[in-house]
Image: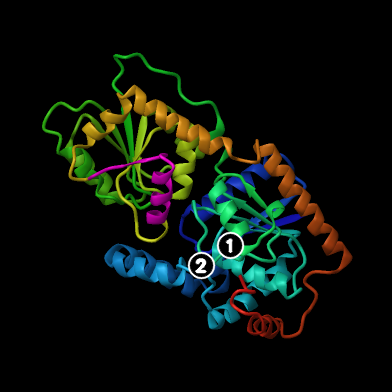
Amino acid sequence: MKILLLPLFKMPSGHHHVADAIINLIEKRTNKIECKKVDLLSYSSKTIEKAVSSLYLKWIHHTPRSYDWAYRHFAYTKNHKHVSFSGIERFFINKLYKLLTSEQPDLVICTHGFPSLLMSRLKLTGVVKIPVINIYTDFFMNDIWGRKGIDYHLVPNQEMKQQMIENYHIKERRIIVTGIPVHESFLKPGKTMHSHSYQKKILIAGGSSGLGNMIELVKNNERKPKYQYIILCGNNKKLFNDIKKLNLDYVKPLPYISSKEEMNRLYDEVDAIVTKPGGVTISEVLRKGLPIFVHSALPGQEYINLQYLKSQYLVYEINRQNDLEAIISGVLQNELEMRKWKKAVSTYLDKFEIPSTNTMFQLISANTLKGAYFNKSGYPFLRVRNVVSKVMKYMKKTSPIDNI
């Protein structure tokens, strides 16, 4: 049996981390299911993937306001209807159909909205009959994700589940609150409490690119620092070298950490984290029970994540004009505030409807078996003539409301 996992870009992201977590979960339990991860852009065209990835990074960092405007007009609109990408979809549906006929998977898992949208089109037109599962990597659902035709939606929170039921009329039984899946390494028991004389450690992270102007967060301390700081620099070698040159005995830079076990040990070593509101990182840290301070948010997804996390009292947003240590101390040394934060985290985690990774595995393996039955029956991936035209004709027939 085979599972095909579909992120979109090649560059490291939460979409890949979630796909990798699912692959690890399956491979630890069975050797009867083959997992294959394919980023759709690279498969379709390495040139397009390279150009789009480069444009995305430059756009979001050089003109963040324009990116935020575009995101809210095309990917997260007020009425939450799908924006038409008919010309783009025509090209990628053809590529995706070729990938499916080549790989013959028994289950497709989408960790990015665009492959999910294409799989939804193929399912609704009857071209594909095997199960499709969406696994969401942010604390909200943008407008690109496929909604109808998807067999299961594994969502991060109860609020998103209710939105899908009430606004998109998706059947409740198809929506399961799982949180954003994380690697099983992060589900191991956490750190033991240190003595009062222990100097607390704070982890500062800015994603795999090492963003967020992190040097300024720690170097302006005019007094003796209360905390030791470990700064994750990601792939940003300049940041790593700049911190080294500061020669601050209370600051330790680290390069990109690829090992999940090593990252888990680092989480166990520290007392709090200062980071960006990326869905996967926040989910890992919530599972580890570490207080979270947000130093910055990229426009689009991260900003919307931040609004949700603040509304649930799961994170503390840092005012860059204020002293970092005073902000952290105001939480860590405030027993009442810590109690309130722990209760908010417990409330969030208690709403998950899948109690363990074993249950997640059972859900995925059951749908893989269902897909294998369809494949053996000769239903899916039949040689459909003009499959792209068939999908486009269906899209024209359905109204914008029907198409969500």
Toward the viewer: 221 or 141? 141
| Residue 252 is one of the magenta-drawn residues | no
Give the Cα distance between marks 2 and 1: 9 Å
Number of numbered labels in the structure image: 2
Q: Residue at x 35, y 53 (%)?
A: 209
Toward the viewer: 335 or 253? 335
Q: Is residue 331 toward the left or the right of residue 16 in the image? A: left
What's under tag 2, amino acid-wise? Answer: His
Q: What residue does disc 2 label? A: 80
Q: Are marks 2 and 1 in contact (CB under 8 Å)?
A: yes
User: Does dot 1 land on a helix, a strand or a loop?
Assistant: helix
User: Does dot 2 land on a helix, a strand or a loop?
Assistant: loop
Q: Is residue 87 above or below residue 359?
A: below
What's under tag 1, amino acid-wise? Answer: Asn
Q: Is residue 260 toward the left or the right of residue 171 in the image? A: left
Find residue 398 and report its horizontal and vertical position in percent. Answer: 65, 80
